[in-house]
Image (cartoon, rainbow, N blue to C red):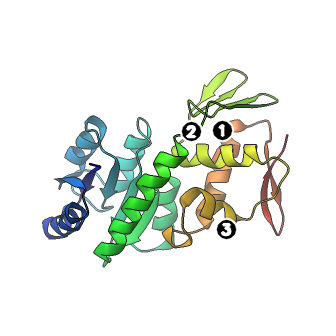
Amino acid sequence: MKKILIIEDDREIAELERDYLVINGFECDIETWGTTGLDAALNGDYDLFIIDVMLPGMDGFEILSNIRRKKQTPAIFLSAKSSDIDKIRGLGLGADDYMTKPFSPNELVARVKAHIQRHETLTSGGSETITVRSLTIDCGARRVYINGREVPFTAKEFDLLMFLAKNPDRAFSKEHLFDRIWGMDALGDVSTVAVHIQRIRDKLAPEKFIDTVWGVGYRFMK
C-alpha cells in the first residue's frame, strides 16, 4: 500500500484529501504545522507528499527545499496561491505538480497515482553510464559528476539532463520536454523547463552541454 503525507493546516481540507486517497487504496498521514510536517517528511517512509504553501511555522516552499536536500520523493503543491510566479517557484524547487484550490478530489487522486507511477518508472532505469567530455551521468545511481566531482541534482533536473544526454544533437521543444519529464500537459507550466535548464547549465558551468535552438527548444551537445 502506497503511503502519502499530507501537510495542510486546514483540517477539513486535509481530511477530504485523506478520505478520497484512502478510498482509492492509499494510506495517509496528516500534519497541520510546517515544522512537524518537515520532520515527518524527512523521517517517514512515504511515496508522495501533498504540501500546502501557506502553513504555520514554515511555508511549503521552505519545506520542499529542505526535503529536496535529502529525498526525491514526488511532491504536489496544493495551494490557494494561484499566480504563475508561485507555480514556477514551486516547480523550480523540485515539485512534481502544482494544483490550486478549490480542487477536484478525483483529479488529485489521479495526479497522485500518475506521479507515483512515473517516479517508479524513471527510477527503475538500468545501470547505463553516459560520459561526454568532463561530464559523467550514472543513470542507475542517478548521480552526476563533473571532472570526477559529484554535483547534486534534483530528481527533475536529473531526469531532464539524462533524457537530453540520451538523445544528443536532437532539438526538443519545451512542450515536448515538459510532457516527457513532468508527465501531462495539464500538470503545470512549460516555463518551468527553462528554469530547470538554466539550473542545469549553472551546475555544469563553465563547460556548455545544453544549447538553445532558437524557435525550437534545447539540445544536448556531445
Q: Residue at x 45, y 62 (%)?
A: 97
What amino acid type should be assigned to the residue bearing mark 2? Phe
Q: Tell which tag, 1 or 2, sits nearer the viewer.
A: 2
- Can you give x and y, in whole percent of width and height, for residue 130 in the image? 73, 33
Query: Contact, CB < 8 Å: mark 1 with mark 2?
Result: yes
Can I make out residue 157 in this image?
Answer: yes
User: 53 or 103: nearer the eye?
Assistant: 103
User: 121 or 108: nearer the eye?
Assistant: 121
Q: Residue at x 34, y 47 (%)?
A: 47
Q: Tell me the element at label 3.
A: helix
Tally of numbered discs: 3
Disc nearer the start of the sequence (3/2): 2
Alpha-carbon span between mark 3 and mark 2: 22 Å
- Can you give x and y, in whole percent of width and height, for residue 88 in the image? 52, 63
**53 vs 94: above or below:** below
What amino acid type should be assigned to the residue bearing mark 1? Lys
Which label sits on residue 153? 2
Which label sits on residue 175? 3
Which label sits on residue 203? 1
Q: Residue at x 47, y 49 (%)?
A: 119
In-image side of 144 versus 37 (left or right): right
Q: Tell me the element at label 2.
A: loop
**206 vs 84: above or below:** above
Q: Tell which tag, 3 or 1, sits nearer the viewer.
A: 3
